[in-house]
């Protein structure tokens, strides 16, 4: 076979490694459940608990009996593993193409980018989950003049849900939102201006700012549904990437096919806010 240097395990490892680098939304999800699932249809029960009541006890009454132990409400969320994205392509006259050099690396990179885009698109759509609160009932018209106030309102909404801003909060914005954000920062001459020059990552207070084309759209694409969230808000698993090479029976070509298995779920809705905005 012309793909004599094709080793499925090596390709799968390479694709997984590049996925970690290319995914924007997935990087900021809770991945701790990944080792508990391995195939389509598997599921994991994610348990959540309420907060215990903190009570006062006067020093002079320190020897008195305390209240009976309270029962803490718990929750159970089931994360099923049902998302599959696959690829299947062939390259004719492969020996001649390989003479150019770098073919395998290029195909691996393109495959990784395509899978990463699909995974991020799926997670980005979770901003529209029914359990996720919107910042405003209807989309707010965002401008350079009010964009920082909108972010402040989102931060306040999380803080009022007892979310600590020191716990790692990320807001992943669209390019058009970021453009206004950068203009607002530049006009205010903030200390973070230099950090924003690369057009990829910046900081707003304790919030990490990221950019993705996979921010969820609604209203025919007129509204961006931007997620500000903690890393615990969404659970994500990508337990398996499979690849194999083969020779199509009716073609003078070699082919590669494979798939990525993944899924995600909003598990802490109080730690995520949908900043729903529209543009002039």
Image: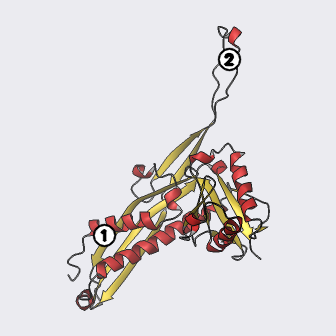
Residue 156 image point, x, y percent: 72, 50
What residue appears at the point 79 percent right and 61 percent down from the top-left corner? 137
Marks 1 and 2, the one that precedes in the sequence: 1
Q: Quadrant of residue 279?
A: bottom right
Within 10 Å of the Cα at label 1, are there few (<14), some (14-19), or many (20+) other Cα atoms?
Answer: some
**Mark 1: secondary structure:** helix
- The label on residue 265 is none
- Split into 4 quadrants, where in the image is the C terminus? bottom right
**Disc 1 target residue:** 11
Residue 18 image point, x, y percent: 39, 67
Number of numbered labels in the structure image: 2
Of the pair 207 and 274, the residue shown nearer to us: 207
State left or right for residue 254 relative to residue 269: left
What residue appears at the point 40 percent right and 77 percent down from the top-left corner? 110
What residue appears at the point 30 percent right and 82 percent down from the top-left corner? 103
Within 10 Å of the Cα at label 2, are there few (<14), some (14-19), or many (20+) other Cα atoms?
Answer: few
What residue appears at the point 34 percent right and 85 percent down from the top-left corner? 90
- Label 1, label 2: how far apart the Cα atoms are: 60 Å
State left or right for residue 191 relative to residue 243: right
Instruction: Residue 211: tell me if it is visible.
Output: no
Q: Quadrant of residue 8?
A: bottom left
**Disc 2 target residue:** 67
Of the pair 155 and 273, the residue shown nearer to us: 155
State left or right for residue 107 relative to residue 119: left
Residue 105 image point, x, y percent: 31, 77
């Amino acid at each position: 076979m012309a793909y004599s240097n094709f080793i499925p395990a090596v390709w799968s490892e390479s694709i997984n490694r590049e996925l970690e680098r290319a995914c924007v939304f997935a990087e900021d999800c809770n991945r701790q459940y990944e080792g508990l699932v391995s195939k389509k249809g598997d599921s994991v029960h994610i348990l959540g608990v309420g907060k215990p009541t903190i009570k006062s006890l006067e020093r002079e009454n320190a020897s008195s009996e305390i209240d009976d132990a309270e029962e803490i409400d718990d929750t159970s969320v089931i994360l099923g593993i049902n998302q599959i994205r696959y690829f299947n392509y062939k390259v004719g006259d492969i020996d001649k193409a390989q003479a150019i050099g770098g073919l395998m690396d290029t195909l691996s990179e393109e495959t990784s980018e395509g899978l990463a885009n699909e995974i991020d698109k799926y997670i980005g759509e979770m901003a529209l989950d029914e359990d996720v609160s919107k910042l405003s009932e209807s989309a707010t018209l965002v401008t350079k003049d009010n964009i920082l106030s909108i972010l402040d309102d989102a931060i306040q909404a999380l803080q009022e849900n007892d979310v600590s801003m020191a716990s790692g909060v990320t807001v992943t914005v669209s390019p058009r939102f970021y453009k206004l954000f950068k203009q607002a920062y530049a006009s205010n001459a903030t200390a973070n201006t230099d950090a924003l020059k690369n057009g990829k990552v910046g900081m707003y207070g304790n919030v990490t700012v990221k950019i993705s084309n996979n921010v969820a759209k609604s209203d025919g694409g007129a509204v961006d549904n931007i997620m500000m969230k903690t890393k615990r808000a969404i659970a994500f698993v990508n337990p398996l990437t499979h690849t194999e090479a083969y020779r199509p029976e009716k073609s003078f070509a070699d082919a590669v096919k494979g798939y990525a298995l993944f899924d995600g779920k909003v598990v802490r809705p109080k730690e995520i806010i949908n900043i729903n905005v529209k543009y002039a």
